[in-house]
Image (tube, helix red, strand yellow):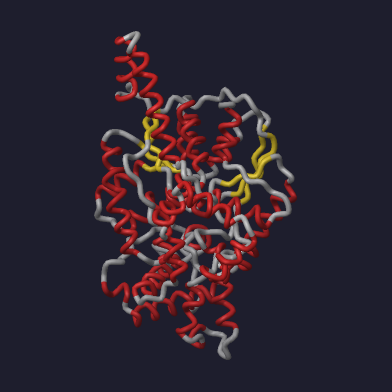
Amino acid sequence: MPAREGSLDAPTRHPLDWQSESFYDRTALDHELERVFDICHGCRRCFSLCNAFPTLFDLVDATDSGEIGGVPKSAFSNVVEHCYLCDMCFMTKCPYVPPHEWNVDFPHLMLRAKAKDFRDGKAKFRDKVLSATDTVGNIAGIPVVAGIVNAVNATAAGRSLLESTLGVARDAPVPKYHSRSARKRHREKRHKSAAVATATATTSARTATAAATTASVPATGTPRVAVFTTCYGNRNKPDLVDDLIAVLEHNDIDVCLPSAEHCCGMPKLELGDLESVAAQKDKNIPVLHALVEQGWMITACIPSCVLMFKQELPLMFPDDAQVREVAAAFVDPFDFLMRLNREGRLKTDFKEPLGAVSYQVPCHLRVQNLGLKTRDVLALVPETTVKPIERCSGHDGTYAVKKEYREVSKKIARPVARQVDEAKARHFTSDCPMAAEQIASVAESATPTHPIELLRRAYGI
């Protein structure tokens, strides 16, 4: 395909036509893959992103003709399997995205191919298990089971078994499971507060009435934020949710958790299981929309979950008004804190400087086009300098834990790990705790701390 100037207009995402039968037509899909791959081959700007592009270019370069027409269509899946839908090529590199007439949306095309493969029964059992975060979390979160799972995962023999049975790389970071989840902790906290209010009521009915009113009716003008704990925050890193709630409450924000919560659907999206994404949407959106109608904003401590509600679900369900309204109410936590700062409402009563901070900006946060809000908030802390690293960690969902992709994921992470090692900062952080663990597993010496935990430390709360 001849060279052509790219569009200078802002990228435009078209809705995902996943419910039409033509979306899954193999002939039409192969034709579109060949068309887009030909454009990518002629451009090659994305060679330094994920391994999908080097894989594509190697396939083309190995042909006698040096053109995409020489690549067998059966090899297209080799490219698809290396795309983890980070959207960075669409948002930062490709000059041919809509509204350009060539209409290249590489991530959506890869998602279409993944959806076709899933419908055709090509998904591995391992991938179905890894994407079933609610089911795995509920089982692994049982008190006795959690202890066993964590103990087995901490041994070489256990990791070897996990690799041989499920194909989870033995050296990949795997999360711990907590039976005392974030949602359980929050319930205990509320029950304790209710007990205190009840005890107070025995000595002062007036005080009890005031306490009950404060708990149920937020003061006029007080921001109200519902925290979507996420699968990871709820079962694997409940301290993260505690830190987020503590920071919000320190800034006089009314906080609640949704009455019910299920996986946002991102793991199933990456698998191409779009029907399961729809099922998760049907569980989450009514609960979240009810909060939105009551004036609550919504946030989450994992960037991919925020992205799922803000972008992916609206693109899958463009005609669903509730999905759109939830998307409009969903906000990144540090973006929200910077909004408070611009209004003069963010507290800056910091007690502890953070010093030098090395900060990896996750891809799923970068594509939200928010700017570096996490850096900006942390930089408000006196005697604190934050150096951002805007490169991929190579983790991206479950990609980095799979045995067949482990070495590639480490290769992607090394440039970030090298910068972290060279910085020798007091703290290393990333908004995505899984990305941080991935980088730490490649770096010579790096102990990750989530930025919301750093902010809580700075406040001394």
Residue 125, position as x, y percentages in the image = 44, 70
Instruction: Decide: is 42 above or below 374.
Output: below
Q: Please name the residue shown 34% across and 57% down the image.
A: 315
Left-right relation of 210 to 108: left
Q: Residue furthest bottom?
A: 64
- The quarter of the rendered structure image containing the C terminus is top right
For residue 167, what is the image quadrant?
bottom right
Left-right relation of 32 to 47: left
Residue 128, position as x, y percentages in the image = 42, 66
Residue 186, position as x, y percentages in the image = 42, 34
Q: Please name the residue shown 34% across and 40% down the image.
A: 258
| Whether residue 369 is visible | no
Q: Please name the residue shown 35% across and 46% down the image.
A: 261
Of 217 and 422, nearer the camera is 217
For residue 99, what is the image quadrant?
bottom left
| Whether residue 92 is visible | yes
Q: Please name the residue shown 51% across and 85% down the image.
A: 71
Say how many tags the image has. Answer: 0
Of 298 and 363, nearer the camera is 298
Instruction: Decide: is 135 above or below 428.
Output: below
Residue 388, position as x, y percentages in the image = 62, 46
Left-right relation of 159 to 114: right
